[in-house]
Image (cartoon, grey):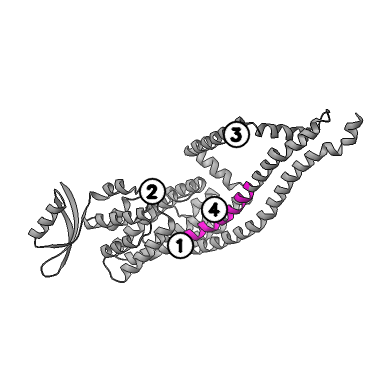
Amino acid sequence: MATFSYVARTRTGTQKRGTIDADNRDAAMMRLNQMGLVADKLVETKGALGVAKRVNLNRKVKGTELLVFTRQLSTIVSAGLPLMQGLDILAEQCEDANFAAVVNAVGQEVESGETFSDALRKFPRAFPDLYVSMVRAGEAGGDLDGVLLQLADYLEASEELRRRIKSAMTYPVVAFSMIIIIATGLIMFVVPQFAEIFGSFGKKLPLPTQILINVSNFLRQWWSWFVILGVGIGTYAGVKLYAKTAVGRYNLDALRLRMPVFGDLLRKVAVSRFTRTLSTLIRSGVAILQAMEIVERTAGNEVYARAIRAAGESVRNGETLAEPLARSQVFPAMVTRMIGVGEKTGALENMLMKIADFYDSEVKATVDALTSLIEPILIGMMGVVVGGIVIALFMPILQLSSLVQQ
């Protein structure tokens, strides 16, 4: 026995939606005819989980896909179209086949009687806790289109922040990779030519030159790359396993925050994410304690997650939000004082949004400064690496007269 979801019309033209159980599609069509319905759409469904198995909906949805979906759905709902019709339209428009299947599955769950938020909760890889909680608050308050608009604005700001961070990280990674490739090329193909010349001297070479030749000889052995690859994979696996432990995750995140240059950027990003997420949740009607739990899970850094968790427990015990955040010493004094003012004046969500906007501008300024600062640093690093290799190679030549005399 299979379950079919249908959209059908009565003899008077009234549209009806629902589900029907039948052995096959023909039997389902016959039952609809017996009920006096003419089917416009008849789709076999086994619920969201069954659909997920067929189309691999466990894959995470891109942020841009979710942003476009949310903004379009907000427009559709605010225009007065039914939610189910909006989901059908957006499922047809999705370029990502997996996300289109997710939207279809959500629509089927809503057709079967689930609320929109409960249907979204069945797809956590596509719709995070923050998204589901805000939609639930919008449903409860009868302002789903307004909440969807807030979600779209939040997702857009988050995507912009992510793009800035990515642009700040891409250049140094590419440039550093080029330095490694150039240095490896010099060591493997240029150094051996000089080594043959130095070998004809029959004398002891300077230590830097000898080390460079030894490294070149090592890299030219086929098994050396397996050693390097094994050490690299082992180190990566060890760090990943360590990061899965609570202590390891905390220590690694704390180390990232202490990194020169990048640490300051990561702190500003964490504060911006915390304040914007909390403001968006409170503004949409989510209770402060539930909002703190969601913000903790989306903090992106264990140091800040622990501080937020402790603050949530303090709020549960009757304290204000600003006091435990100030005690954690991970949030700047300006942030905690502005939050305290927002709590006293009853405008916490507005104050949090102002803080988020300020730190977004700080992140942009830091990224711009970082980009201009990294370029000379990397050029200097390349000069040191290449210059060091050249000096090591020419040291014996500079000492040629003394080596010949010996």
Q: Secondary structure at mark 1?
A: helix
Query: Residue 294 location in percent, x, y?
Result: 40, 51
Q: Main secondary structure of the magenta part?
A: helix
At 30% from the left and 56% from the top, the residue drawn is: 117
In this rendering, the label closer to the viewer, 2 or 4: 2
User: Which residue is under mark 1?
Assistant: 156
Which of marks 1 and 2 precedes in the sequence? 2
Which of marks 2 and 3 precedes in the sequence? 2
User: Which residue is under mark 4?
Assistant: 331
Estimate the spatial distance between the alpha carbons at disc 4 and disc 3, rounded to whole Å.
45 Å
Q: State if disc 3 and disc 4 touch (CB < 8 Å).
A: no
Q: Amino acid at mark 1?
A: Glu
Q: Amino acid at mark 4?
A: Phe
At 77% from the left and 43% from the top, the residue drawn is: 390
Q: Specify the segment rendered in magenta.
A: 158-177
User: Which residue is under mark 3?
Assistant: 225
In this rendering, the label closer to the viewer, 4 or 3: 3
User: Which residue is under mark 2?
Assistant: 59
Q: Amino acid at mark 2?
A: Arg
Q: Secondary structure at mark 3?
A: helix
Which of marks 1 and 4 precedes in the sequence? 1
Estimate the spatial distance between the alpha carbons at disc 2 and disc 4, rounded to whole Å.
34 Å
**Rendered position, 192 above or below 89:** above
At 52% from the left and 34% from the top, the residue drawn is: 238
Find out whether residue 168 is within the magenta segment. yes
Which of marks 4 and 2 precedes in the sequence? 2
Task: Please rate how many residues cluster around mark 1, counting C-alpha atoms within 10 Å: few if below 14, some from 14 to 19, many from 20.
Answer: some
Find out whether residue 219 is within the magenta segment. no
- The extreme bottom residue here reads 79
Estimate the spatial distance between the alpha carbons at disc 4 and disc 1, rounded to whole Å.
24 Å
At 30% from the left and 61% from the top, the residue drawn is: 87
Which of marks 3 and 4 precedes in the sequence? 3
